[in-house]
């Protein structure tokens, strides 16, 4: 593996427990799984906790930790709680709707180190080109990003939109197409993670309002750090410094 170090994988989960089991088996087949510190936080839902706690291939990872919250956290708080437990510089955020090609980790690590030789950046591993639904970053980037990863201003949505926009404004964003990290959209449609569709709608509307309000101020990034750019179509320009 050369001098490639350990990387934390942050996985919050609630519901979708059948998908979680499939996702964990897929992740356990990763080439280089011994590099992974896997952190799972189960958000007030016992079925997923039992599956994660009793997963029979957990020893293929460098470390394997399952946390449980009796209180409903929702996705942003869960992600931020996992980030607080992360003890490696590099980390990846994912969900239990994802399956992995065996070469995804080494491909992503090598690409990240090539594009961001100083490790300061955000690499989208899937979803839309201009949105890191799931991806790879580093604590060095978080420090450069004014000490912030996912903003706690959000509850369930738009945290990854802000992260992506901030990384673009800082000239530190890239999207790796065909990373080998694949989301199954049919899982999302099958299982409801909220008490009602109305509860989800209200929270998404509130988060969207926060996002657009903050975007009008370039997310409060210092002007001397903002990278000159002309929109999402020009994100692959050469990095500064």
Image: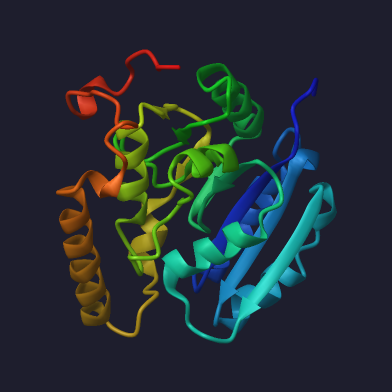
User: Measuring 26% from the left and 81% from the top, which residue is drawn there?
Assistant: 199
> Where residue 83 sits: x, y (%)?
58, 57
The residue lying toward the viewer, choosing from 151 and 129, is: 151
Q: Count the marks.
A: 0
The residue lying toward the viewer, choosing from 216 and 212, is: 216
Locate the C terminus by quadrant.
Answer: top left
The residue lying toward the viewer, choosing from 65 and 51, is: 65
User: Measuring 80% from the left and 53% from the top, which residue is drawn there?
Assistant: 63
> Where residue 147 sits: x, y (%)?
48, 49
Residue at the extreme top: 238
**In the figure, is residue 6 to the left or right of 94?**
right
Q: Is residue 125 above or below residue 14?
A: above
**In the figure, is residue 120 to the left or right of 89?**
left
Q: Is residue 221 above or below residue 236?
A: below
Say which quarter of the image contains residue 127.
top left
The residue lying toward the viewer, choosing from 232 and 98, is: 232
């Amino acid at each position: 593996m050369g001098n490639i170090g350990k990387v934390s994988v942050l996985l919050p989960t609630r519901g979708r427990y059948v998908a979680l089991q499939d996702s964990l088996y897929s992740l356990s087949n990763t080439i280089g799984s011994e590099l992974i510190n896997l952190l799972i936080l189960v958000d007030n839902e016992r079925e997923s906790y039992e599956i994660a706690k009793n997963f029979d291939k957990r020893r293929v990872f460098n470390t394997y930790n399952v946390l449980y919250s009796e209180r409903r956290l929702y996705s942003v708080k869960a992600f931020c709680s996992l980030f607080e437990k992360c003890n490696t510089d590099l980390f990846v955020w994912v969900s239990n709707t994802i399956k992995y090609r065996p070469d995804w980790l080494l491909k992503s690590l090598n690409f990240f180190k090539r594009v961001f030789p100083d490790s300061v950046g955000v690499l989208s591993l899937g979803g839309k080109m201009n949105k890191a639904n799931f991806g790879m970053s580093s604590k060095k980037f978080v420090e450069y990003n004014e000490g912030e990863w996912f903003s706690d201003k959000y509850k369930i949505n738009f945290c990854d939109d802000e992260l992506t926009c901030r990384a673009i404004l800082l000239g530190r964003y890239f999207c790796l197409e065909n990373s080998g990290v694949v989301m199954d959209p049919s899982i999302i449609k099958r299982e409801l993670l909220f008490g009602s569709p109305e509860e989800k709608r209200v929270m998404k509307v509130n988060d969207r309002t926060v996002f657009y309000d903050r975007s009008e101020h370039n997310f409060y990034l210092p002007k001397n750090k903002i990278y000159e750019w002309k929109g999402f179509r020009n994100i692959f320009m050469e990095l500064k410094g």
